[in-house]
Image (cartoon, rainbow, N blue to C red):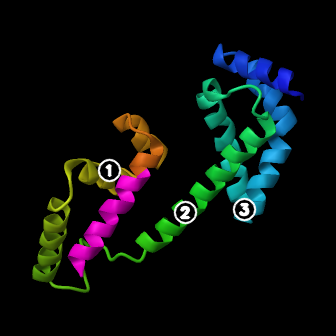
Amino acid sequence: MNDQQFANSISRICRNDREGLREIYEDYSPMIYSVVREILGSREDAEDVTADFFIRLWEIADTYRPGKGHRAWLITIARNMAIDHQRKRKRESLSAEIPDYLQTGQESCEENLCRKLSLEQALMTLKEEERQIINLKIMGELTFREIAAVLKKPQGTVAWCYRTAIRKLREVQL
């Protein structure tokens, strides 16, 4: 697909014509999968991110600017999504190490209550927006993309606020 054909397909996407997305998918899905697989190393994760890539492309089609090289634009998006996915996996594995303060059996009721109160006090040190993001991410189990849509904020801002809040909570817990 040349630049003009790509621009035409993007225009169709902007007009909510799924045929434009299908054309891009047919021409570029192997390339996108390859880029993502190289970064992630996992076939399953690469398939997930590749599928998410085309959903994301549908959402951001209006940001494409012709003349800048459409392949580089596609690869940059795919690469960033793969890196974000890697970071998310890393954070999830780190958060899995955080003890469940509400767990019973190993500690007395009083110890659980003290831990819960300490967590609530730690959460109160956060700004309202940070608490909201922490709650949506951990309790609501939403992705950064979903949180960004709910809060009507850029996904990068949501991720940054989340990391900042987690850092603050770790400092309070020390």
Q: Is residue 174 left or right of residue 97?
A: left
Indicate the quadrant where residue 151 lies: top left
Task: Residue type at mark 2: give it.
Answer: Arg
Task: Residue type at mark 1: give it.
Answer: Ile
Q: Is residue 12 above or below residue 37?
A: above
- At mark 1, the secondary structure is helix
Is there a contact, CB below 8 Å, between mark 1 and mark 2?
A: no
Q: Main SS of the magenta segment?
A: helix
The span from disc 2 to disc 3 (Cα, nearest Å) is 12 Å
Q: Does residue 148 appear in the picture of this structure?
A: yes
Read off the residue under disc 3.
39
Q: Earlier in the sequence, mark 1 or mark 3?
A: 3
Residue reaching furthest to the top: 15
Read off the residue under disc 1.
133
Q: Is residue 56 left or right of residue 161?
A: right
Q: Earlier in the sequence, mark 2 or mark 3?
A: 3
Q: Is residue 51 left or right of residue 26?
A: left
Residue reaching furthest to the front: 67
Specify start and end residues of the magenta stretch as a single range. 159-174
Toward the viewer: 14 or 65?
Answer: 65
Read off the residue under disc 2.
87
Q: Is residue 89 rendered magenta in the image?
A: no
Q: Is residue 154 above or below residue 49?
A: above
Is there a contact, CB below 8 Å, between mark 1 and mark 3?
A: no
